[in-house]
Image (tube, helix red, strand yellow):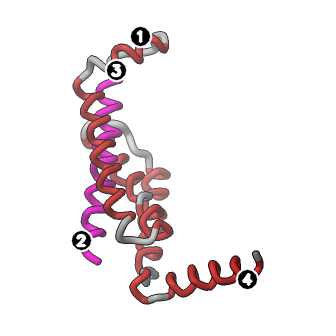
């Protein structure tokens, strides 16, 4: 069970890094036309790095989905809000007011509470529920 969680954390961190790369790469474009922004995006190494980070994050997330319930894995992605905010503060020097810190703390507590309630499919609960739904659908149809 630990390997998928570590890979999930890696996917979340790569997604956060991708977000920072995209913002850093687009920061100097300013408010130009959409066409100028789109063409400039594909000539900027930070933007390309951001896309690469997102791609790698997606591939890792696919691995995670093959091993964890999506109802568990996807809500854990909320940690991305925390990592992006911290990276934006550290790297982009964005200000993070106290009310945002409070919001991030609430998200963190929520994810921690959510994580402690995971039982996984290996308990058989998910399989039994899926089987019951399928059997019920066959009985009705």
User: Residue tagged by mark 1?
Assistant: 36
User: Residue tagged by mark 4?
Assistant: 139
Name the residue rendered at 35%, 47% in the picture.
84
Q: CA distance from mark 2 to mark 1?
A: 43 Å
> Is residue 36 in view?
yes
Q: CA distance from mark 3 to mark 4?
A: 54 Å
Magenta stretch holds residue 133:
no
Q: For the residue carrying disc 4, how many other residues have a C-alpha within 10 Å: few (<14), some (14-19), or many (20+)?
A: few
Q: Which residues are magenta?
A: 1-27
- Label whose residue precedes the other's in the sequence (3 or 1): 1
Mark 3 or mark 2, whichever is nearer to me: 2
Name the residue rendered at 31%, 42% in the picture.
55
> Is residue 92 in view?
no
Instruction: Determine which of the numbered discs, if any, sits on residue 3 in the image.
Output: 2
Q: Secondary structure at mark 4?
A: helix
Name the residue rendered at 47%, 74% in the picture.
114
Q: Secondary structure at mark 3?
A: helix
């Amino acid at each position: 069970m630990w390997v998928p969680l570590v890979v999930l954390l890696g996917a979340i961190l790569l997604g956060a890094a991708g977000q920072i790369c995209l913002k850093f790469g687009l920061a100097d474009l300013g408010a130009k036309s959409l066409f100028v922004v789109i063409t400039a995006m594909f000539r900027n190494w930070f933007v390309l790095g951001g896309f690469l980070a997102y791609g790698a994050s997606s591939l890792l997330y696919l691995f995670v989905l093959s091993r964890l319930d999506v109802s568990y894995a996807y809500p854990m992605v909320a940690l991305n809000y925390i990592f992006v905010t911290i990276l934006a503060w550290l790297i982009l020097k964005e200000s993070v007011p106290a009310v945002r810190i409070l919001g991030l703390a609430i998200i963190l507590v929520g994810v921690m509470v959510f994580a402690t309630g995971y039982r996984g499919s290996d308990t058989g609960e998910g399989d039994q529920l899926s089987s019951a739904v399928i059997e019920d659908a066959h009985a009705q149809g």
